[in-house]
């Protein structure tokens, strides 16, 4: 571990503007100002260069007198950990965020991707949705607990990591003995990305979704070979024909629908806002799946379906190089997503059985992280419900299983209850700009969320 002691002055060398020293007009103003500065730090992964972002955070935290360490575990790649000490009566709370972002194709954007531009009430920048805004909300919660000298029953740790968008190198380092395993492993709760709070087009909240579970990517490769030859004389068991036959069996295969507890709650909470007959189905998902008409409709709805079953998407196909040559090999890749609790070996056998052709090799991924979930019945979930309920009365706080993956998959096995949560409200259109073009978030939700997120952290960490 390399601990850096960089004077704040060194930050002047960064492309991003130096944080101003004067007091902010309000926490909301500070959130907008810091977010726009943070979005100007280019942490595109690859290469990541998260050290720049870590030093940005470090300067702010140190100015507030909060102890912070930076671990540059590879050149330019770094994690950061800041600690607010509590009495130790309760186990720590970790606020975790990743500092890297996916690449942005500037030619497709209407603004510069690392401008932090504020225009028409929208803040633009790669990372605005995933997950630099959440990082700033977490940072401000820690700063405010410190400035307001809130007595704490538990330590509050602010953990910023590198490389979430690629190989989780930062989080893996953080939980390793060379990193901060000893400081992280005793935590009771961790809050990170993955939650989804949906607003309608008018900005009215429909629900707050706390991510309590996520699916696991289990990417498969199919490979087959056969006799090559002239395209003018077909070969019935050629490699392309075998592959197409296998893929057609995969395409037609329907994986079983299953109801996990968190998913069941999500649909029950959605029932009041959908019309019949869907409302009845959502209220009692298990009965709905036993009814062929309902089951068919739920299976065919791709958003619903992905929450109820292991899914397979055919994404890559490779074979051939010339129209009149039958190639000797053919390959395909399948994006398989498994529900929490699934046995990957069992699913692999299932796929092989469906393909029913030993000449088609099915290759599992070298690394598989078992998808996992956290309990819903916890003090943290109830704290989130209370705080959100105060600010948005009547809007349900529900559970949302993520069909993607976050670092929680690494932290949950340490015995930490991990939730994806922020109060940020986004429309479906805004959410889709994460990893997309013109990534942006509304200034209004950043302002409104700053205080709500702080209250949620205070609710679970402050002395009772
Ligand atoms: Zn992310």
Image: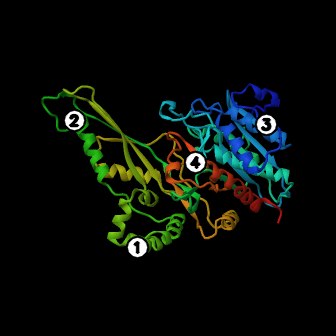
Q: Which residue is mark 4?
A: 406
Side of 117 relative to 275 (left or right): right
Q: Which mark is residue 238?
A: 2
| Label 4 or label 3, whichever comes before in sequence order | 3
CA distance for labels 2 and 3: 67 Å
For the residue with label 1, is its CB less than 8 Å from the closest atom of ligand 1? no
Instruction: Return the x and y of residue 435 as percentages of the image width and height.
Output: 52, 41
Q: What is the crowding at mark 4: few (fewer than 14 residues within 10 Å), some, or many (at least 20)?
A: many
Q: Which residue is mark 3?
A: 20
Foreground residue, 190 or 444? 444
| Label 3 or label 1, whichever comes before in sequence order | 3
CA distance for labels 4 and 2: 40 Å
Q: Which mark is residue 276?
A: 1
| Label 2 or label 1, whichever comes before in sequence order | 2
Side of 181 relative to 219 (left or right): right
| Camera-nearest label, 4 or 3 | 3
């Amino acid at each position: 571990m390399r601990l850096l002691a960089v004077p704040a002055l060194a930050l002047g060398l960064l492309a991003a503007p130096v944080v101003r020293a004067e007091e902010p007009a309000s926490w909301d103003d500070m959130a907008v100002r810091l977010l726009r500065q943070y979005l100007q730090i280019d942490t595109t992964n690859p290469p990541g260069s998260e050290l720049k972002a870590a030093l940005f955070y470090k300067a702010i935290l140190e100015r507030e007198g909060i102890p912070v360490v930076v671990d540059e575990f590879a050149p330019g790649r770094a994690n950061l950990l800041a600690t607010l000490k509590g009495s130790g009566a309760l186990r720590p709370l970790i606020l975790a965020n990743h500092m890297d972002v996916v690449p942005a194709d500037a030619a497709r954007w209407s603004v510069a991707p690392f401008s932090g531009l504020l225009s028409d009430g929208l803040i633009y920048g790669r990372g605005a949705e995933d997950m630099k805004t959440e990082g700033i909300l977490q940072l401000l919660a820690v700063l405010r607990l410190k400035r307001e000298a809130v007595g704490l029953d538990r330590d509050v740790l602010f953990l910023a990591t590198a490389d979430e968008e690629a190989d989780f190198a930062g989080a893996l380092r953080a939980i390793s003995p060379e990193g901060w395993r000893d400081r992280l492993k005793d935590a009771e709760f961790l809050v990170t990305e993955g939650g989804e709070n949906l607003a309608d087009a008018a900005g009215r909240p429909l629900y707050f979704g706390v991510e309590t579970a996520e699916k696991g990517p289990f990417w498969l490769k199919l490979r087959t070979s056969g006799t090559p030859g002239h395209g003018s004389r077909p070969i019935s068991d050629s490699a392309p024909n075998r592959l197409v036959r296998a893929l057609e069996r995969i395409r037609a295969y329907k994986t079983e629908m299953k109801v996990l507890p968190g998913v069941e709650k999500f649909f029950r909470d959605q029932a009041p806002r959908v019309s019949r007959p869907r409302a009845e189905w959502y209220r009692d998902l298990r009965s709905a799946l036993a009814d062929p008409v309902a089951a068919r409709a739920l299976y065919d709805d791709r958003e619903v379906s992905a929450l109820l079953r292991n899914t397979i998407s055919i994404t890559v196909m490779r074979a051939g190089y010339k129209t009149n040559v039958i190639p000797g090999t053919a390959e395909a890749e399948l994006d398989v997503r498994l529900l929490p609790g699934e046995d990957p070996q069992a699913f692999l056998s299932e796929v092989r059985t469906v393909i029913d052709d030993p000449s088609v090799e099915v290759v599992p991924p070298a690394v598989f992280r078992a998808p996992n979930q956290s309990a819903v019945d916890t003090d943290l979930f109830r704290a989130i419900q209370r705080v959100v309920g105060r600010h948005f009365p009547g809007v349900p706080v529900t559970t949302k299983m993520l069909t993607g993956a976050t670092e929680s998959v690494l932290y949950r096995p340490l015995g930490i209850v991990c939730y994806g949560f922020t109060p940020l409200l986004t429309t479906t259109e805004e959410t889709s700009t994460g990893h997309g073009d013109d990534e942006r978030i509304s200034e209004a939700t950043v302002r409104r969320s700053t205080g709500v997120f702080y209250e949620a952290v205070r609710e679970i960490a402050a002395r009772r």
